[in-house]
């Protein structure tokens, strides 16, 4: 394309290039977007979930045999909906649904159509969230749409997108002022960054400024992919500013030529720089001119990706062998059918999400009909839920997601089915177990759900895990690999070993408990769990304490208190 060519419309071929451009850029930015997640626990990170969702969308786009824009946007939307993972993936699928709604009966996309698409995307995304929170991807998409609406007189779609992206970047940089959690952690919103990344990639695909590979997308776990990183070093530092007149925008303009994933935030006292670059020395030399440095961190991302792939492959093999050994299960990739309850002729079936051999066996012993393999850092897609629902013979189904980041995918899947489905919003395994203990198949679905929801309110959950990144949350200055103690999802203790963290929680957050259940996970031992039991019995000799091997990954201990 010549430098002065004006793009007045987008045909099917060009739209595909834009989508491939967005996918390529999401792949490049995945780890950076993941790093923006405020909460440092191992869970379904935003960059990973948005990439997996958009990858499913483009894979489905590749199957569309028409070059019409309406058919292509419809295919993109459908793929995103079925492949959506985590809250960020579900919101992304709603944005793409709005994009599709705006292009009904359109053979090509004009600048007016693009403006309407951005507006409809934001509108549908807001409608899809029960309680929209400002300072998130929703705000960023709305600001992008508003800016687009002010540019009706621009004929050149490239120029239109350029100005929209500039405003989107400004909206993203303001998210820390809208959400205290972001300001405390010194980051912008991860979902908003993902949306900006998609817009940037679409523009690059539109103009041909990057090489866009249009081969069919191969569906696989993103952590297994060979990623050819353009920039090798993730470079971060905090600057104690000596020159109070320095402007953040000036810093961005000075160093953006040296890499990508650039983030510069702060105030007149302290400024944080984050950039992916091949020349970390240049960045640090520049930063020294502004002030003194602290918390310097340089990571070789190529080595990290190689190590991550190796660990993931080993874990996959171990889990596959573990699941094949389970005599009570029929192994079918992500869906595990409980043969024990299959012949009970129950009116209401139960689907649960879980990870760990012991946890799965406990759930099945309590009557779960089908388990979707997944959980922390392994969020099932909407399609995983759809396939599970279709596999169940009954028309009445209870779903236990067991993770806050999985609930939205379960809800979307239930809306796609003609069956009578109720989502009991369990956020941890102990809540699921409590809910199952009051399950009465002879009752109607509404009463079953009501009783389960009442029961899970009586449960307190302690989870012990490790920080996957440096972060500042709830007043804690958390370092990577610190032991974290969470009570009902909120960080209540940080330390260097599990026993001390649990003891701190017991001392600061204790109520009279009658039943305490300890589920020890992958890497923990029964002897260690016995030491934790002693700590609880020292606090209350009347409490009944039980220990089970859960086998769950990432969380050495999950403890239920009732």
Image (spheres, helix red, strand yellow):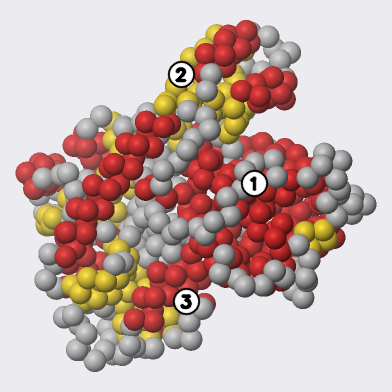
Q: The C terminus appears in which quarter of the rendering?
A: bottom left
- Name which residue lies at 28% across and 86% down: 441
Give how far across and how far down residue 384 sits, in percent. 40, 69
Q: Secondary structure at mark 3?
A: helix
- What is the x, y in percent for residue 38? 48, 40
- Residue ID at (23%, 47%): 314
The secondary element bearing badge 1 is classed as: helix
Dot label at residue 201: 1
The quarter of the picture where the N terminus appears is top right
The answer to whether residue 206 is visible is yes
In the rendered image, which residue does mark 3 sit on?
Answer: 414
Q: Nearer the viewer, residue 227 or 54?
A: 227
Report the residue at 71% width, 15% height from top.
Answer: 246
Q: Position of residue 195 (x, y in %)?
A: 63, 49
Q: Earlier in the sequence, mark 1 or mark 3?
A: 1
Crowding near pointer 3: few (<14 within 10 Å), some, many (20+)?
many
Among all residues in the image, which is located at the extreme right?
Answer: 153
Q: Is residue 212 left or right of residue 497?
A: right
Q: Residues within 10 Å of mark 2 (few under 14, many from 20)?
A: few
Disc 1 from disc 2: Cα separation: 31 Å
- Residue wearing tag 2: 295
């Amino acid at each position: 394309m010549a430098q002065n060519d004006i793009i007045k419309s987008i045909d099917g071929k060009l739209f595909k290039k834009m989508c491939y451009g967005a996918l390529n850029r999401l792949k490049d930015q995945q780890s950076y977007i993941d790093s923006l997640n405020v909460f440092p626990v191992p869970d379904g990170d935003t960059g990973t979930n948005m990439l997996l969702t958009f990858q499913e969308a483009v894979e489905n786009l590749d199957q569309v045999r028409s070059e019409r824009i309406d058919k292509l946007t419809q295919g993109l939307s459908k793929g995103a909906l079925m492949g959506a993972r985590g809250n960020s993936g579900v919101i992304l699928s709603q944005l793409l649904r709005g994009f599709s709604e705006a292009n009904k009966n359109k053979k090509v996309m004009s600048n007016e159509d693009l403006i309407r698409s951005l507006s409809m995307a934001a509108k549908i995304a807001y409608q899809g969230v029960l309680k929209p929170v400002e300072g998130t991807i929703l705000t960023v998409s709305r600001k992008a749409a508003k800016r687009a609406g002010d540019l009706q007189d621009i004929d050149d779609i490239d120029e239109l997108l350029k100005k929209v992206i500039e405003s989107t970047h400004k909206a993203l940089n303001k998210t820390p002022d809208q959400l205290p959690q972001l300001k405390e952690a010194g980051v912008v919103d991860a979902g908003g960054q993902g949306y900006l990344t998609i817009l940037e990639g679409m523009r690059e695909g539109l103009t041909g400024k990057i090489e866009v590979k249009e081969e069919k997308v191969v569906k696989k776990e993103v952590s297994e992919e060979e990623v050819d990183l353009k920039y090798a070093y993730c470079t971060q530092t905090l600057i104690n500013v000596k020159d109070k007149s320095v402007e953040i925008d000036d810093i961005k303009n000075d160093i953006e030529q040296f890499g990508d994933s650039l983030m510069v935030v702060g105030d007149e006292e302290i400024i944080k720089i984050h950039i992916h670059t091949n020349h970390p020395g240049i960045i640090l030399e520049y930063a020294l001119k502004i002030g003194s440095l602290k918390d310097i961190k340089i990571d070789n991302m190529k080595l990290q990706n190689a190590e991550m792939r190796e660990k993931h492959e080993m874990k996959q093999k171990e889990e596959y062998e573990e699941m094949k050994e389970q005599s009570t299960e029929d192994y079918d990739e992500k869906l595990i059918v409980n043969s024990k309850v299959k012949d009970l002729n129950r009116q209401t079936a139960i689907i649960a999400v879980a990870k760990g051999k012991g946890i799965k066996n406990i759930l099945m012993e309590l009557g779960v009909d089908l388990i979707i393999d997944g959980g922390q850092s392994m969020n099932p897609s909407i399609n995983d839920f759809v396939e599970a629902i279709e596999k169940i013979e009954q028309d009445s189904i209870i779903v236990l997601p067991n993770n806050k980041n999985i609930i939205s995918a379960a809800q979307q899947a239930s809306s796609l089915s003609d069956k009578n489905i109720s989502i009991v919003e369990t956020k941890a395994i102990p809540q699921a177990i409590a809910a199952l203990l009051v399950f009465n198949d002879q009752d109607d679905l509404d009463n079953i759900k009501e009783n389960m929801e009442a029961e899970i309110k009586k449960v307190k959950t302690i989870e012990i895990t490790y920080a996957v990144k440096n972060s500042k949350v709830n007043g804690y200055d958390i370092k990577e690999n610190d032991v974290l103690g969470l009570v009902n999802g909120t960080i209540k203790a940080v330390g260097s070993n599990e026993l001390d963290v649990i003891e701190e929680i017991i001392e600061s957050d204790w109520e009279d408990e009658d039943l305490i259940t300890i589920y020890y996970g992958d890497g923990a031992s029964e002897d260690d769990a016995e030491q934790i039991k002693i700590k609880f019995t020292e606090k209350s000799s009347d409490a009944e304490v039980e220990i089970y091997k859960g086998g769950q990954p990432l969380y050495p201990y999950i403890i239920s208190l009732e």
